[in-house]
Image (spheres, grey):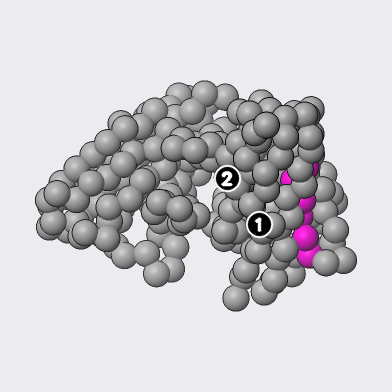
Amino acid sequence: QSALTQPPSASGSPGQSVTISCTGTSSDIGGSNYVSWYQQYPGKAPKLIVYEVRKRPSGVPDRFSGSKSGNTASLTVSGLQAEDEADYYCSSYAGTTRVFGGGTKLTVL
Amino acid sequence: QVQLVQTGSELKMPGASVKVSCKASGYTFSNYVMNWVRQAPGQGLEWMGWINTNTGNPTYAQGFTGRFVFSLDTSVSTAYLQISSLKAEDTAVYYCARPLDGTTTLPNYWGQGTLVTVSS
């Protein structure tokens, strides 16, 4: 199962909005409502921030929002803050397996 | 609260084996599957598979069959990942991760990770 495709980097200034894309196929993102996003700081374990395309676990700010269209999922971070600088990974259920994207490094300028 | 505590870092020679443990606490171990995820240095996340902690039945992702074995000791609420015939490319941080709830396999609660370094 190939990894999902994410841009290697994204950036924005504090207060702005940034959208990170995640492209898959009809076998994963296109055929599943089980798309999730993780945030990871260097040297730390990933943290789930969006699941089932657009749901947020308790405690995750509503500045993080997810969406999906066809074979592409997106994560939008609104009102960028310095603490949002991290790596972000998308993931999708694909039949009986799970696949991750290659990751996007978000830089807050 | 849910906690997953993993083995400390390991340094192994090529060809050797390693067994990483993941001790769970704060919930009923057999009610949730356990995922394993690999992250090579400077690289992204790779889902390795999961094990049903109720039946002991493992599911391995492509590329993680043969040398990789998931196992359990339910008496001590611990999941294990054993890797045999280690290669340099197995050098990575290995995470165990419990799902958000009992109806999904989606990793939500993560261990701190175990760095396995394979080098002569």
Outermost residue to the front: B120
Q: Position of residue A57 (x, y in %)?
A: 44, 63
Question: Which secondary structure, mark 2?
Answer: strand
Q: Nearer the viewer, residue B111 or A35?
A: B111
Chief secondary structure of the magenta portion:
strand
Residue at image position (57%, 45%) is: B93
Q: Are marks 1 and 2 in contact (CB under 8 Å)?
A: no
Give left or right: position of A10 versus A51: left
Q: Element at badge 1?
A: loop
> Label 1 sits on what residue type?
Gly
Mark with earlier residue (1, 2): 1
Q: How many dots with numbers?
A: 2
Residue A69 appears at what percent x and percent y?
33, 34
Q: Nearer the viewer, residue B73 or A70?
A: B73
| Residue B13: quarter of image | top right
In the figure, B24 relative to A77: above or below?
below
Task: Tell me residue B19's x, y (percent).
Answer: 77, 47
Q: Amino acid at mark 2?
A: Val
Residue B95, horizontal then vertical, whole percent: 60, 50
Q: Which residue is mark 1?
A: B8
- Foreground: disc 1 or disc 2: 1
Q: Chain of mark 1?
A: B
Residue A76 seen in the figure: yes
Residue that carries the numbered disc 2 in the rendered image: B93
Residue at x 42% of width, y 47% of height: A37
Up/down of B71 relative to A57, above or below = above
Q: Quadrant of the N terminus of chain A?
A: top right
Q: Quadrant of residue B54?
A: bottom right
Verify whether residue B81 appears in magenta: yes
Q: Is residue A5 above or below residue A32?
A: above
Read off the magenta span.
B77-82
